[in-house]
Image (cartoon, rainbow, N blue to C red):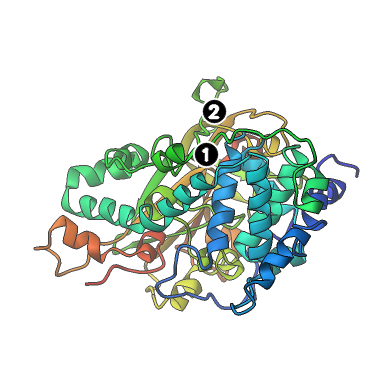
């Protein structure tokens, strides 16, 4: 989706505010939102790509206005309803539906403390597909404009770069985000010159490196 | 063109989030309780909505609040840029480790036995007098959590995400780092599940320092690539 989240190359977003001695969470509720997301993902009802797409579905004005954890909060509520863990009525009333059965949380405090980071493994080495591209080859990112989730940024579409590394087979976000399967593909690191992406005013020395999936690319 | 992933899907997806008690208003059963705390600063709307959601999820048995406590504690007290700093200090002190780190970042970081490193796909990129690396995520806020903890607000902000790829020299200047024209800048946009860590240059005058003293010099910003390490 050509949404507001795809920000690479936009200008005039203002200065970067660098806070000294920034706390991990500015307010306690931010930590609770973060942790709720982690605890709820243990239900296995959604995946990281679906949750990223959930943020992308925010209206652009809200995306720019909301803080990071506000976006997480809204996204989490939406995913809860979408996947049926919570009903719309329960959200509306902030109460469990009368007579509903109490579940058992899948993430315990012991497990959470023992493995506070559990990002999962997105590599699928046994998926079997052959890599179409090799390090050193020139490739072009396709001009794709899907309405759904994609990890091919607008600024790289139609541009030529060089493969610098094969990462192996990885879960494909464009399908996984929509619960259409992992459909693993080869992932490559690509080097684009700054001039290829941004034209003659860019430094002739600089480069931008992206990790892109096989079906985003063609031989240049 | 009709699409299952198009704007109609957005409206359906957000229906639950955009309406109802958790969206903006304070739930009825929490209002009386809030009146007991009128002497305190009013909690923000987001704080109230979060509290309402957490209460609902606990009542439904979907989450264990003590698991939330454990996660918050881990990120506030254990997982953070100190982990990354130890990796950098070891790479500066141990040439064989530095080599392993640059060839296979995930495996070399795995040797340090930090929590959460299992299955992490890490690439470590090295700054030299000729090459400067900078990490960004233009599409969201991907960041190497196990080695740097959760990202600072500026890393997640529109100004940084938008400009790091088109004007890295201008961005670095805003952080107080002016790079000569003949230094090559490599910007790493974290578009997949590969996470990037910058191995900064070891500053002059640190030859006699121990590994733990060196780790004390290494900042989060230097491992994202927006700063140098200074003595």
| Residue positioned most to the left | B208
Please identify the quarter of the rendering in which residue B198 is found.
bottom left
Residue at which label 2 appears: A131
- At mark 2, the secondary structure is loop
Residue A34 sits above or below residue A132 on the image: below
- Which dot marks residue B18? none
Are the residues flagged by discs 1 and 2 in contact, CB closer than 8 Å?
Answer: yes
Looking at this view, is B158 or A23 the one in front? A23
**Residue A61: image x %, image y %?**
76, 67
Apparent side of residue B90 relative to residue A25 in the rendered image (left or right): left
Which quadrant is the N terminus of chain B positioned in? top right
**Residue A53: image x %, image y %?**
69, 47
Residue A42 sits above or below residue A10 on the image: above
Please identify the quarter of the rendering in which residue B20 is found.
bottom right
Looking at this view, is A15 or B26 the one in front? B26
Apparent side of residue B204 relative to residue B200 in the rendered image (left or right): left
Give the residue drawn at x 40%, y 48%. Answer: B146
Apparent side of residue B117 relative to residue B69 in the rendered image (left or right): left
Decide if residue A190 is in sight here.
no
Residue at which label 1 appears: A188
Mark 2 residue crowding within 10 angstroms, few (<14) / some (14–19) / many (20+): some
**Chain hosting mark 1:** A
Decide if residue B107 is in sight here.
yes
């Amino acid at each position: 989706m050509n949404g507001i989240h795809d920000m690479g190359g936009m200008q005039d977003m203002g200065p970067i505010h660098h806070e000294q001695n920034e706390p991990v969470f500015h307010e306690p509720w931010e930590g609770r939102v973060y942790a709720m997301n982690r605890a709820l993902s243990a239900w296995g009802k959604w995946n990281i790509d679906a949750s990223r797409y959930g943020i992308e579905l925010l209206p652009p004005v809200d995306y720019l206005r909301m803080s990071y954890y506000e976006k997480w909060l809204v996204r989490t509520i939406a995913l809860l309803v979408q996947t049926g863990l919570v009903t719309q009525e329960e959200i509306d009333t902030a109460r469990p539906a009368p007579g509903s059965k109490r579940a058992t949380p899948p993430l315990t405090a012991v497990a959470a403390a023992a493995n506070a980071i559990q990002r999962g493994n997105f590599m699928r080495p046994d998926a079997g597909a052959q890599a179409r591209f090799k390090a050193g080859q020139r490739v072009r990112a396709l001009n794709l404009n899907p309405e759904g989730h994609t990890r091919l940024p607008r600024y790289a579409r139609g541009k030529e770069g060089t493969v610098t590394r094969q990462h192996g087979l990885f879960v494909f976000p464009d399908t996984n985000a929509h619960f259409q399967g992992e459909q693993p593909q080869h992932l490559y690191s690509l080097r684009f010159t700054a001039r290829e992406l941004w034209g003659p005013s860019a430094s002739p020395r600089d480069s931008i490196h992206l990790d892109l999936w096989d079906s985003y690319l063609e031989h240049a | 063109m009709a699409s299952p992933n198009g704007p109609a899907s957005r409206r359906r997806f957000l229906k639950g989030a955009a309406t109802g008690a958790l969206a903006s208003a304070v739930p009825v059963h929490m209002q009386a309780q809030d009146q007991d705390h009128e002497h305190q600063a009013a909690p923000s709307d987001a704080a109230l909505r979060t509290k309402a959601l957490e209460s609902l999820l606990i009542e439904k048995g979907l989450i264990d609040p003590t698991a939330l406590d454990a996660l918050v504690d881990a990120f506030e007290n254990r997982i953070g840029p100190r982990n990354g700093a130890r990796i950098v200090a070891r790479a500066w002190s141990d040439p064989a480790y530095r080599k392993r780190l640059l060839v296979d970042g995930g495996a070399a970081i795995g040797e340090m036995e930090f929590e959460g490193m299992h299955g992490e796909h890490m690439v470590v990129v090295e700054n030299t007098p000729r090459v400067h690396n900078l990490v960004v995520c233009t599409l969201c806020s991907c960041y190497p959590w196990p080695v740097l903890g959760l990202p600072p607000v500026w890393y997640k902000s529109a100004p940084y995400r938008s400009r790091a790829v088109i004007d890295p020299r201008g961005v670095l200047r805003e952080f107080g780092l002016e790079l000569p024209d003949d230094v090559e800048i490599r910007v790493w946009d974290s578009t997949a599940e590969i996470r990037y860590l910058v191995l900064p240059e070891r500053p002059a005058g640190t030859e006699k320092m121990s590994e733990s003293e060196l780790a004390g010099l290494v900042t989060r910003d230097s491992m994202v690539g927006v700063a140098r390490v200074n003595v």
